Structures are given as C-alpha cells and as structure tokens.
C-alpha cells in the first residue's frame, strides 16, 4: 500500500494475483479506484445517500419502497424495452474494462478469475447448491429485518405485464451477478493482493463494499449482503473461480424477481405496498 515500486509476480492465485508486466503500486491503486468509481463504488455512495434520505423521513423504513426493476417509460412498452436493454448493457461496461485490464497483464482476461466456460458443470452445480442456502436464509433475514423496522419494503420488480417482462428480469439478474462477482470478488481481491493487503483485510473490504451498495434497502440489506460477501470470498479462494458465484447470484436474483412477479398479492407472507 505504501510505495510506488514496481509490482511483479510469478503466479495467479485467487485473491493474490500479480500482473505479468511491470505496474507501480500507484498505477494499480488508481486503476482500482477508477474501476470502482465507474461501477459498484459509486453505487455504494448512491445507496448511502438513499439510505440517509430514508431514515430521515417521517415514516418508518418498512413503510417505504425500494424498487429494483421498474419501468423507465410507463405506457410506452417499446421505449421502455429499449431503456431496459440499454441499462443492462451499459452496466456491464466495467466488466469489459476489467477484462481489458487483465488482458493487458497477459493473464487471459476474465479467464484468470474463473469467469469462462471451461467448467460449466462445476460452476452450475456448486452455484445451484449455494443459491439454495443463501437464497433461503436471505429471504428469512429480509422478512425479519423488515418486521423489526430495519428494512425498506423491497419490490424486486414493477414492470408492466408485457411479453418482454420475464426475459428482461432474467437478463437483469444475470447482469447483476456478472458485474458484482467479477468486480467485487475476482478483480478487487486480485488488485488488493497485488497492493499488499492481507487476505483478511481484502475479505473485509470486499464484504463491506458488497453490503454498502445494498444499503438503499436498509440495515438488513447491508448486513445480509455483507455476510454473503464473506461467504463468497471464502468460496472463491477455495474454488479459484467466480463462475459458481455468478451462477449462484444469478439464480438467487432470478428466483427473487420472477417469484415476486408471480406471487405478489397472492400470498400473505410476501410484503407489498
């Protein structure tokens, strides 16, 4: 973290990768800050501002709504679809940037993070099992936090009933998964390792960052996602791949988005406003 000497390395180790070419610590630090400022770091600041606005309102948190997938052009479905696809596509630009930066290191781009198609069975199998555990416990935490007044009412989707609704929700879920796991786990751990952070400090940074950009949902969203972040970092270090994490995250969000669309207003236990 201190000096600006060149950082060189020999091996690719999850969470402790080193560039194949000479890069100063200052360059790595600035690059990391820029990538975060263009992606989830900025989302964390936005979520904090949103949370401060929510807690300073006169009504309680659970009386307020956090909508995850809403309409951008109500009453104009084709324009709405164009905005939805634009948002999903542009949200993945930081991932393309990370791929470019890793290719510059000559480590194989996103393949260095385990974001590839080399082990689809492994990624999907481990991801499905992880999604079942994290998704179920996450739902219980959300319901408990909301009942206690620590969380806003999360509305996973508020899209019109048009033909593209479910495909867009699935695409949004996959986009969230790819963006978050590539940036917050694979890329961030690699760069922090190159900057000399200890494994524990890098784990804490990744988990806190993940929690921060979910703070707009309330304290429950922050804590729950921070715990998820710790688990995901530990599994990434064990497996050496973000593939299972992307699969798990995508499945969790797909079930949440589509489940809400199908069940909202039809079951008593699912909060709606």
Image (cartoon, rainbow, N blue to C red):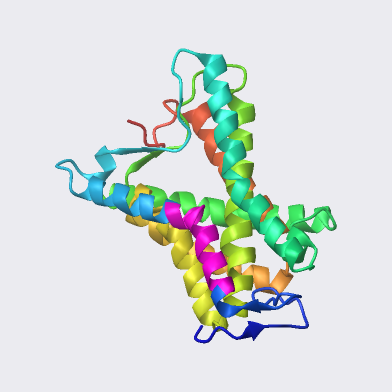
Q: Nearer the viewer, residue 24 or 181?
A: 24
210 on left or right of 195: left
Q: Residue at x 47, y 49 (%)?
A: 139
Q: Nearer the viewer, residue 233 or 3?
A: 3
Magenta span: 27-42
3 on left or right of 239: left
Q: Is residue 249 visible?
A: no
Expressed as whole percent of the image width and height from the top left, the position of residue 86 reads 58, 32
Expressed as whole percent of the image width and height from the top left, the position of residue 164 reads 61, 21
Q: Is residue 25 visible?
A: yes
- Whether the magenta-drawn stretch holds residue 34 is answered as yes
Expressed as whole percent of the image width and height from the top left, the position of residue 58 reads 14, 42
Q: Is residue 244 above or below residue 198?
A: above
> Looking at the rendering, in which quadrant would you find the C terminus?
top left
Q: Is residue 161 above or below residue 65?
A: above
Q: Quadrant of residue 84?
A: top right
User: Magenta-highlighted stretch: main secondary structure?
Assistant: helix
Q: Residue at x 57, y 46 (%)?
A: 176
Considering every residue shown, the one lying at the far top of the view is 75
Q: Nearer the viewer, residue 200 or 230?
A: 200
């Amino acid at each position: 973290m201190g000096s600006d000497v060149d950082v060189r390395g020999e091996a690719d180790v999850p969470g402790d990768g080193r560039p194949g070419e000479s890069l100063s610590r200052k360059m790595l630090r600035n690059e990391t800050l820029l990538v975060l400022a263009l992606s989830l770091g900025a989302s964390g600041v936005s979520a904090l501002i949103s949370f401060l606005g929510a807690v300073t309102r006169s009504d309680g948190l659970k009386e307020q709504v956090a909508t995850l997938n809403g309409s951008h052009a109500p009453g104009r479905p084709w324009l709405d679809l164009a905005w939805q696809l634009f948002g999903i596509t542009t949200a993945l630009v930081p991932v393309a940037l990370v791929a470019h930066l890793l290719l510059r290191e000559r480590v194989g781009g996103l393949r260095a993070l385990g974001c590839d198609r080399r082990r689809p069975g492994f990624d999907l199998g481990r991801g499905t099992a992880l999604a079942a555990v994290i998704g179920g416990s996450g739902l219980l935490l959300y319901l408990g936090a909301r009942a206690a007044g620590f969380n806003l009412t999360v509305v996973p989707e508020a899209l019109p009933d048009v033909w593209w609704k479910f495909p867009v929700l699935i695409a949004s879920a996959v986009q969230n998964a790819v963006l978050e796991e590539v940036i917050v786990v694979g890329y961030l751990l690699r760069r922090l390792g190159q900057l000399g952070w200890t494994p524990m400090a890098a784990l804490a940074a990744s988990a806190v960052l993940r929690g921060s950009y979910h703070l707009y949902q309330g304290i429950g969203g922050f804590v729950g996602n921070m715990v998820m972040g710790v688990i995901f970092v530990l599994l990434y270090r064990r497996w050496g791949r973000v593939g299972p994490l992307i699969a798990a995250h995508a499945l969790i969000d797909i079930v949440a988005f589509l489940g809400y669309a199908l069940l909202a207003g039809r079951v008593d236990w699912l909060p709606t406003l």
